[in-house]
């Protein structure tokens, strides 16, 4: 049996109000082709299918068209879990209909725990795989609030709640393990030691509840993770992996190799684990330096023969504001049709700061998530002072705002 693991599509994602629809569609078309050419039996999408809880009509159309086209491939089962960007109610709304087409949706932790356990049968009706489809675990899913607890106590209870959730599967999958049936778990969380990019939203379970690789039950033959956009192993454990996002979602991911992961089980054993690179259709390029350095780097850029023209973020380090910077830089790329957009930043240098601190990543407000904005404002208001209690409280407020439509349902 062959399984393909992907995550963090973020359909509907924009980069400074610039649509990414073409790039996402290129990936989805490529994925449909791979499901057929690789004869994939099961597709697992480990959360953050959409970029927001209220996706655009275009994002919905891409999602449902993709699921429709899956039925024309070898893929017999699709398993989708909710991520922290996804709305539980939005994902779950069509779940009963989609189940008829062997598309299994677990938008949030269900009332009945065992509804997270999905059995996959072959064409002859023999059980060949079990998937413990764990979605993004919200605070209310894994712990009860305790008045007066410290930040470290809250963090400890959160980690324990996450681990307890996964350990609860052990009694339900015991017989499958005895029978030699492989068991896969999913997750959408931040595992300790993971390397993040600018585009991950810092959210409660995403950073405080860091779970180490050896804290997952050893009964799982593979753990398909989402939430971190850089593909990587957890704690050097080959069977616990982030597939990463298939499309670079910020300029900090320009050098990342985007991929999906293909697994193959034979006789109940994992016999193949392959990282399959996703082809790049639009290059995101980041250029840094003073004005003269940036101008030289822009002039040296060459056509990389991608399907769509490149987008370039230009960070100019300067002591004074350059009023005509946009016009100046755009004139340099007029004869470079392979560059479609320039995203300019002016990074003010401060002589009073240490040399290592003289340049910062400059970002437009539209690029920043609420937690990052809060942290920047907090640091400017209270330099050198970090109140963990306040940061934790703000993180919980963010989560409750994101879940308000679920709480009210």
Image (tube, rainbow, N blue to C red):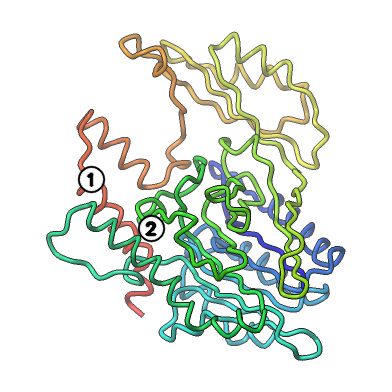
Relative vertical location of residue 180 with respect to residue 317 in this rendering, above or below:
below
Relative vertical location of residue 396 with respect to residue 145 in this rendering, above or below:
above
Rendered-image quadrant of the C terminus: bottom left
- Residue 69 in sight in this render: no
The image quadrant of residue 372 is: top left
Relative vertical location of residue 394 with respect to residue 408 in this rendering, above or below:
above
Residue occupying image coordinates x 69% and y 42%: 257
Side of 41 where 242 appears, left or right: left
Tell me the crowding category of disc 2: few under 14, some 14 to 19, or many 20 or more residues within 10 angstroms, Cα based.
many
Residue that badge 2 annotates: 205
Residue 241 spot, x, y in % from top left: 60, 55
Mark positioned earlier in the residue sequence (2 or 1): 2
The image quadrant of residue 360 is: top left
Residue 186 spot, x, y in % from top left: 55, 67
Q: Nearer the viewer, residue 243 or 53?
A: 243
Res. 388 mark: 1
The image quadrant of residue 397 is: bottom left
Residue occupying image coordinates x 30% and y 42%: 374
Res. 107 mark: none
What residue occupies the far front of the structure in this picture?
A: 178
Residue 258 spot, x, y in % from top left: 68, 46
Residue occupying image coordinates x 48% and y 41%: 367
Residue 39 spot, x, y in % from top left: 84, 69
């Amino acid at each position: 049996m062959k399984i393909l693991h992907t995550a963090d599509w973020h359909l509907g994602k924009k980069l400074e109000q610039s649509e990414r629809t073409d790039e996402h569609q290129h990936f989805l078309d490529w994925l449909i082709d791979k499901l057929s050419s690789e004869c994939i039996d099961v597709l697992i999408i480990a959360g953050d299918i959409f970029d927001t809880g209220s996706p655009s009509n275009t994002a919905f159309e891409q999602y449902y068209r993709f699921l429709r086209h899956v039925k024309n491939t070898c893929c017999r089962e699709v398993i989708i879990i909710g991520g922290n960007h996804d709305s539980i109610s939005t994902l779950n709304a069509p779940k009963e209909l989609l189940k008829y087409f062997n598309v299994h949706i677990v938008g949030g932790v269900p009332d009945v725990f065992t509804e997270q356990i999905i059995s996959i049968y072959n064409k002859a009706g023999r059980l060949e795989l079990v998937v413990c489809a764990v979605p993004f675990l919200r605070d209310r899913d894994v712990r009860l609030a305790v008045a007066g607890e410290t930040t470290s106590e809250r963090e400890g209870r959160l980690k324990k709640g996450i681990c307890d959730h996964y350990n609860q599967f052990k009694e339900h999958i015991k017989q499958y393990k005895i029978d030699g049936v492989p068991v896969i778990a999913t997750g959408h969380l931040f595992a300790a030691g993971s390397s993040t990019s600018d585009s991950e939203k810092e959210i409660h379970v995403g950073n405080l509840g860091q779970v180490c690789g050896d804290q997952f039950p050893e009964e799982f033959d593979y753990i398909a993770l989402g939430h971190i956009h850089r593909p990587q192993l957890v704690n050097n454990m080959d069977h616990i992996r982030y597939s990463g996002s298939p499309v670079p979602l910020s300029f900090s991911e320009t050098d990342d190799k985007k991929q999906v992961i293909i697994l193959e089980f034979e006789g109940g054993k994992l016999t193949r684990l392959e990282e399959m690179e996703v082809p790049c259709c639009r290059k995101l390029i980041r250029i840094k330096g003073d004005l003269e350095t940036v101008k030289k780097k822009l002039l040296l850029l060459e056509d990389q023969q991608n399907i769509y023209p490149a987008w370039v973020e230009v960070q100019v380090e300067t002591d004074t504001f350059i009023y005509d910077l946009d016009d100046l830089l755009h004139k340099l790329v007029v004869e470079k049709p392979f560059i479609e957009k320039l995203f300019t930043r002016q990074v003010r240098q401060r002589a009073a700061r240490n040399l290592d601190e003289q340049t910062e990543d400059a970002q437009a407000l539209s690029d920043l998530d609420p937690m990052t904005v809060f942290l920047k404002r907090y640091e400017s208001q209270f330099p050198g002072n970090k109140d963990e209690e306040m940061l934790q409280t703000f993180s919980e407020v963010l989560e409750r705002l994101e879940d308000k439509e679920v709480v009210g349902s």
